[in-house]
Amino acid sequence: MLDRGALREGASGPDVERLGPEPEPESESGVARACDAAAEGFRHSQLQAARNIHTASHARAHRAGTTCGDCGESFGSEGAHSDRCQGAASAEFTGYTGRRHQHCIRGSKTLTVFRHGAMPGEIREIRAIDLFAGVGGSSAGASAAGVKVVAAVDSWSLARDTYTANFPEVTFLQRRCENVSIRELKKRIGSIDLLLASPECTSHTCAKGSAPRSEASRRTAFQVIRFARAFKPRWIVVENVVHMRSWKRYQRWLGALKALGYNVREQVINAADHGVPQARRRLFVMCDRDDIPSEVTPRSGRRKTAGAILNRNGKYKFSPLRSEKRAMATLERADRALTALGHSKPFLLVYYGSDAAGGWQRVSAPLRTLTTLDRFAYVKPGADGHFMRMLQVPEIKAAMGFPSTYLLDHGTRREKIKLLGNAVCPPVLTAVLRRLTGVGSI
């Protein structure tokens, strides 16, 4: 583990690792050349075909208590485990890669990895690094699934303060990913099994409108390739806005992942299908070196609604909907809602930003996508007309799927909303990891 006392930013500030002097950023051309070089000599299709055959043969032999026809591994009885893997009558075989066995232990919170050559009883958790970590949504989701996050990277000091308040045991590097010395980082934290990343999305998203796009911002996705090439984790999960797929370099980036030996699945997932009270669609690129990633299926049951996150006990102050200061466009949106619902029902109003769905929504549906703006107002009927207030930070935090205990004590109200608007919904990342790795799924 890293020495968390290497640098203290102030008497009361968090400990933050500084891994030597900041190196020069690695250029996109350098990353691309390395990716192209990897692609030239890559024979992954043949290797993966053989590996898949081996996996199937090994799993069948384990279930039947016979011998794997591919490698000769012998199982003395149905469901038994070989001497090379720590036997346990309560374990279930989940996959064989030619390098290690993996078993899910019933009642265990984490997926346990048994490597060939390990001493009996030696157990290692899935270890992860979180790039572009922000407020910590991916780390929260991974931790809920039983993954051990060992390091996180983000350049924003407010993200650092919030992240380290919630994950004090994780090494946090406050710098841009391209300025991280991977050689030094590897020496300090060792190997990882999982790479999580949410590269900059502002120059992909339609929320940017007609504002100029930054290709430098988009190119941050290639840092995933740089870290993957160095750490060689088994799994990678990249989250971004759906519009990332229209980026002119997207296929090249995707090809670079495949050239490194990964089986890749692209899937657009709606957070509302995984217990989050928000209809938030995001692209997830799931990668596995050893198996083909399976589709993440929606959870059963009714969706949570916007009404579930609203505080209705009078804690927050309302103001009259109709006032001289209220913009005409806002009142027009409210009138559309009143025409559709009548005057006796509450509703949510799009107060800032553009909206193509009429500018309002029912509280009985999942909240529409939150952004980094203070976007939604809650409107309710009263004795003297309608009254409104903006959604508050605890409500927005709940709408993103964060637990009520998650700390958000740093920054202004606007900064907290920006942190949350950029975040990954933790329950979605938990569902993705359970499907991809099997962790926490038993």
Image (cartoon, rainbow, N blue to C red):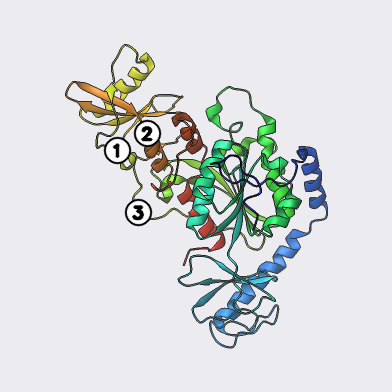
| Residue at (49% x, 58% y) in the render | 145
Measured as percent of width and height from the top left, residue 415 is found at 49, 31
Question: Callout 3: helix, strand or loop?
Answer: loop
Mark pair 2, 1: CA separation:
9 Å
Checking the image for residue 301, the label placed there is 3
Q: Which residue is mark 1?
A: 311
| Residue reaching furthest to the front | 11
Amino acid type indicated by mark 3: Gly
- In screen coordinates, is 68 left or right of 208? right
Measured as percent of width and height from the top left, residue 317 is found at 29, 28
Amino acid type indicated by mark 2: Gln
Q: Earlier in the sequence, mark 2 or mark 1?
A: 1
Question: Callout 2: helix, strand or loop?
Answer: loop
Give the image quarter of residue 23.
Answer: top right
| Residue at (28% x, 26% y) in the render | 318
Mark pair 3, 2: CA separation:
27 Å
Checking the image for residue 392, the label placed there is 2
Amino acid type indicated by mark 1: Asn
| Residue at (70% x, 44% y) in the render | 223
